[in-house]
């Protein structure tokens, strides 16, 4: 298993599936801060981050200055934000404004993880051991592999569904505008028995979004708006849906870097923000446990594992967990330093270049903020 390829290609499916029926991009009307608004979604005034300086927060100013110089030498990095002790201490943009939104690709999966946790907290889902097929009673199971009856939510959260899947392949001939994407995903053949292997599979997260829709009685977006976006004071600017109107759980949502930092802040504080428990502490902690235990190498991260749709690296100088999307869309959370780092990057690149760009960003984070 090559984690660099696994992560860097994690959102490639979003490009390929989008081409099947949608030209997905920065849509809506521009706002004065550089953001875009889409009438389909609720837009609220951005959260007013307290602003400080690296020196005031006790950070090594020489290291921060060196980091900024290196970031500037890599024009593919579009934004680089550092939050320390809940204050914004570094905000870098390469040709963008603070209100610009970016497709965060597979970092969307970590958002989906939070929504599953909230659904469990609210009793809409009993537990991660609930059977997947139980949420789709209308699915024709007459020719279904009997092993799929053992599918659990946890196996989809941990990428252990066993589905035969290659993130680098073109799946547009399977996921066409004329088919039901949920049932198509559930009918994909198995390569492994459920629970046996970690295989990064974007349809796993898409199915979880379908479950959120079914148990909440509303769209995944409407549920997220009520239980997550409004409390965090953030706005999704665009979000891909399948032909049936189910929001993608695995890719293709658009946020500003500042809004992404709020999601990182929520997890940094064990699900509590502004004095309110949004996600239970237990869910956050369970989400961040290493579940694949393979200690994969990803650039300067030498012990990379996967939890509930969150990546983690727990053998570095300071442990870090992260949401990660194609070509450098990251939310790094470093609990021991009370720090969050958000990056966005040029996603109009090849898979190989995306691999390189991600490794460069990880190197900057490791050298200047973790060492």
Image (cartoon, rainbow, N blue to C red):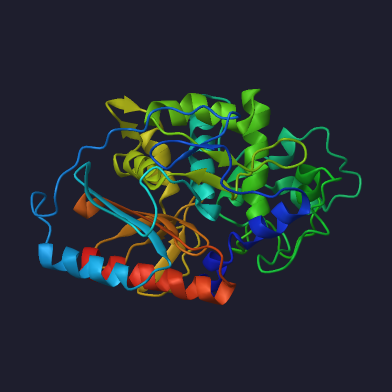
Q: Measured from the top left, where is residue 141 in percent x and y?
A: 86, 43
| Total numbered badges shown on the rendered structure | 0
- Is residue 334 visible to the viewer in this orientation of the structure? no
In front of the other: 192 or 318: 318
Residue sitting at x 59%, y 41%: 239
Q: Which quarter of the rendered picture does the C terminus lie within?
A: bottom left
Q: Position of residue 353 (x, y in %)?
A: 52, 75
Q: Is residue 42 above or below residue 351?
A: above
The quadrant in which residue 54 appears is bottom left
Q: Is residue 210 left or right of residue 323?
A: right
Query: In the rendered view, would you say 280 is above or below 129?
Result: above
Quadrant showing the N terminus: bottom right
Vertical relation: 51 (above or below) 324: above
Note whether residue 56 is visible.
yes
Q: Residue at x 53, y 67 (%)?
A: 8
In this orientation, which residue lies closer to the viewer: 319 or 331? 331
Query: In the image, 106: left or right of 357?
Result: right
On screen, residue 186 versus residue 292, left or right, reads: right
Q: Measuring from the top left, give residue 35's x and y in whole percent.
A: 45, 40
Residue 14, position in %: x, y? 65, 55
Residue drawn 21% across the image and 53% down it: 336
Quadrant in which residue 70 is drawn: bottom left
Residue drawn 72% across the image and 42% down it = 242
Residue 299 placement, left or right of 137: left
């Amino acid at each position: 298993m090559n984690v660099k390829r696994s992560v860097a290609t994690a959102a490639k499916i979003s490009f390929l599936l989008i081409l099947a029926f949608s030209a997905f991009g920065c849509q809506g009307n521009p706002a004065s801060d550089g953001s875009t608004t889409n009438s389909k979604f609720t837009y609220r005034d951005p959260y007013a981050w307290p602003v400080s300086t690296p020196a005031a927060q006790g950070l090594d100013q020489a290291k921060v200055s060196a980091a900024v110089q290196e970031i500037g030498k890599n024009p593919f990095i579009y934004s680089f934000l550092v939050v320390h002790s809940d204050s914004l201490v570094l905000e870098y943009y390469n040709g963008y404004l603070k209100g610009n939104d970016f497709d965060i690709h597979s970092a969307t999966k970590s958002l989906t993880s939070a929504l599953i946790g909230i659904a469990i907290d609210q009793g809409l889902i009993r537990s991660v051991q609930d059977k997947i097929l139980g949420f789709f009673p209308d699915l024709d199971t007459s020719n279904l592999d009997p092993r799929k009856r053992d599918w659990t939510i946890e196996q989809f959260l941990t990428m252990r569904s066993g589905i035969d899947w290659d993130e680098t392949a073109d799946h547009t001939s399977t996921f066409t505008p004329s088919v039901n994407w949920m049932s198509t995903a559930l009918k994909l053949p198995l390569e492994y028995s459920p629970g046996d292997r970690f295989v990064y599979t974007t349809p796993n997260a898409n199915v979880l979004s379908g479950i959120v829709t079914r148990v909440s009685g509303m769209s995944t977006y409407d549920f997220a708006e009520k239980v997550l976006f409004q409390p965090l004071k953030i706005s999704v600017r665009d979000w891909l849906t399948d032909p049936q109107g189910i929001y993608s759980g695995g890719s293709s949502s658009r946020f500003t870097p500042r809004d992404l930092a709020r999601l990182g802040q929520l997890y940094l504080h064990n699900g509590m923000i502004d004095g309110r428990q949004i996600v239970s502490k237990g869910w956050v902690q369970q989400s961040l446990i290493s579940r694949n235990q393979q200690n994969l190498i990803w650039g300067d991260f030498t012990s990379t594992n996967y939890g509930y749709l969150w990546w983690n690296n727990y053998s570095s100088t300071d442990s870090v967990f992260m949401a990660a999307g194609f070509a450098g869309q990251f939310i790094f959370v470093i609990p021991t330093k009370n720090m969050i780092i958000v990056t966005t990057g040029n996603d109009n690149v090849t898979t190989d270049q995306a691999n390189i760009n991600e490794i460069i960003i990880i190197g900057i984070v490791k050298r200047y903020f973790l060492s």
